[in-house]
Image: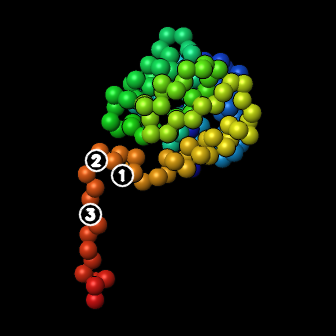
Amino acid sequence: MTSVLVVDDEPMLRTLVADVLDEAGYFVTTASDGEQAIERLRDMRPDVLLLDLSMPGIDGWAVLESLAASKSRRGLPIGIMSAARNVERAIPFSGAVRLISKPFDLDDLLQTVHELATHSAVSYSALHPELPRRRPRRSFASAV
C-alpha cells in the first residue's frame, strides 16, 4: 500500500486531504507543521510527501532543506501544496516535485499523488544515479 505523509498547518485541509487519500486506498500519516514532519520522516519512509510551504515555526522550505541534506531521503516524490508562486526553487530538492495549487480540485490531487507514487515506484538506482550500480549475478544454472 502506498504511504503518503500530508503536512499542512490548516486542520480542515489536512483532514480533508487525508480522508480523500484514505478513501482512495492510500496509507496516510499527517503532520501539522514542519517540526512534526521532520519527526515523522525520521520514523518512516513515505512513498509520497504532500507539503505545505507556508507554516508557522519550521516551514515547508526548512523541511525541503532537511530532506536535501539527507542522502537517504533524496528522490522522495513531493507534492507542494501552496498558493505561493515561487515554488520553482523547490525543484532542486527532490527527484519529483509537483505543484498542487491551492485551492485545488480533489480529482487533480488524486491524479498528482498517483503520478508521484508511480515515480516513487521507479527503481532506487534510477532515483540515485550517483550510487554505483551492482551488476546482476550470473546464475550458472541458467547457462545450462
In contact (CB < 8 Å): disc 3 and disc 2? no
- Label 1 sits on a secondary structure element that is helix
In contact (CB < 8 Å): disc 2 and disc 1: yes
The amino acid sitting under disc 3 is Arg
Precedes in sequence: disc 2 or disc 1: 1
In this view of the protein, which residue sits in the foreground, 84 or 71?
84
Please say if 8 is above or below 118.
Answer: above
94 left or right, relative to 143: right
Q: Position of residue 134 (x, y in %)?
A: 26, 59
Q: Quadrant of residue 63?
A: top left
C-alpha separation, residue under disc 2 versus residue under disc 1 = 7 Å
Q: Nearer the viewer, residue 106 or 126?
A: 126
Q: Nearer the viewer, residue 94 or 12?
A: 94
Q: Residue sitting at 47 percent across and 52 percent down? A: 122
User: Residue at the spot x=49%, y=39% of the render?
Assistant: 96
Q: Amino acid at mark 1?
A: Ser
> Looking at the picture, how far across and down is residue 108, in whole percent?
70, 38
Which numbered tag is attached to residue 125?
A: 1
* Residue type, numbered disc 2: Leu
Which label sits on residue 16?
A: none
Question: Quick check: 49 left or right of 73?
Answer: right
Up-down relation of residue 51 to residue 76 (above or below): above
Q: Is residue 33 visible?
A: yes
Compared with 35, 138 (above or below) is: below
Label disc, if present, on residue 135 of the rendered structure: 3
Q: How many marks?
A: 3
The residue depicted at 65 percent of the width and 20 percent of the height is 83
The numbered disc on residue 131 is 2
Residue 129 location in percent, x, y? 33, 48
In percent of width and height, residue 59 lies at 50, 16
